[in-house]
Amino acid sequence: MSKPVIAYHFVGDTLRDGSAIPPDGEWLVYAGECVMCEKGLHASRHPFDALQYAPGATLCLVECDGIADEQSDKIVCRRRKIVARFDATALLRGFARKCASDVLPLWDAPQVVKDYLATGDESLRDAARDAARDAAWAAALDAAARAAALAAAWAAARAAALAAAWAAARDAARAAQKTYFAQLVDAEFAKLGVKP
């Protein structure tokens, strides 16, 4: 057998099939045919990639063995063992606030949004969410009104330029977020005495 691969896997209260999550150090074995996104044991080589598949907030550092297939953001394997785990709720909320704070200069955020992002005061979360939603809706309506007033050719050229700029900015921001998230995760596992 090849050397197990270190990866990341989020879990909720149970595994996706409803079975119990095995204890740390115990191999979970899948005997059937592994099919990406359908059958087998899944994980991601990067914790940021594992986020999009998270059914819960417990982040596990896992060893994967018998890899049957791999895509850019996930692997499917026959054997997976939890090396260590932690409740990532606070980390995930802090990360989300950091990502939102990074774009504050791009809009006129309501004060309650700024206060929540700066403090993480959960008593402000619902008010901040509602204020951000209302501001986004107003901005969308305003943008729609402006777009309707532009000539069709100008709007198309501007839209293409904006789409290209947005894609470049999005990709750069995603790379920075991915690196930052990995640093947060590594620090949490280091507190447990584990180095990914």
Image (spheres, rainbow, N blue to C red):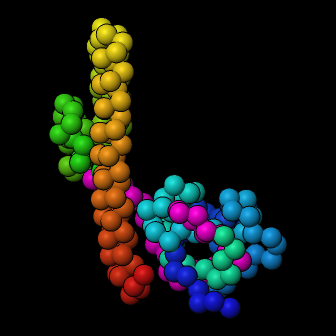
- Vertical order, 137 against 68 (above or below): above
Residue nearest the viewer, comparing 28 with 155? 155
Q: Which residues are magenta?
A: 70-98
Q: Residue placed at 53% from the left, 68% from the top? A: 44
Residue 94 in view: no
Q: Which residue: 36% across, 34% down?
A: 163
Q: Based on the displayed image, in which of its 4 quarters is residue 9 positioned?
A: bottom right
Furthest residue to the right?
32
Residue 184 appears left or right of 57: left
Q: Is residue 185 visible?
A: yes
Residue 185 percent location from the top left of the image = 38, 71
The verdict on residue 77 being magenta is yes
- Toward the viewer: 168 or 63? 168
Q: Is residue 96 above or below residue 166?
A: below
Q: How many marks?
A: 0
Residue 21 found in image quarter: bottom right
Q: Quadrant of residue 158?
A: top left
Residue 150 relative to residue 24: left or right: left
Which residue is more in the foreground, 16 or 151? 151
The quadrant the C terminus occupies is bottom left
Q: Is residue 67 left or right of residue 72?
A: right
Residue sitting at 36 percent across and 69 percent down?
Answer: 182
Q: Residue at x 36, y 21 (%)?
A: 156
Q: Position of residue 29 (x, y in %)?
A: 73, 79
Q: Is residue 49 above or below residue 62?
A: above
The spot of residue 33 in percent (x, y) is 80, 70
Magenta stretch contains residue 138: no
In depth, the one of 192 and 67 nearer the eye is 67
Which quadrant does the N terminus fall into? bottom right
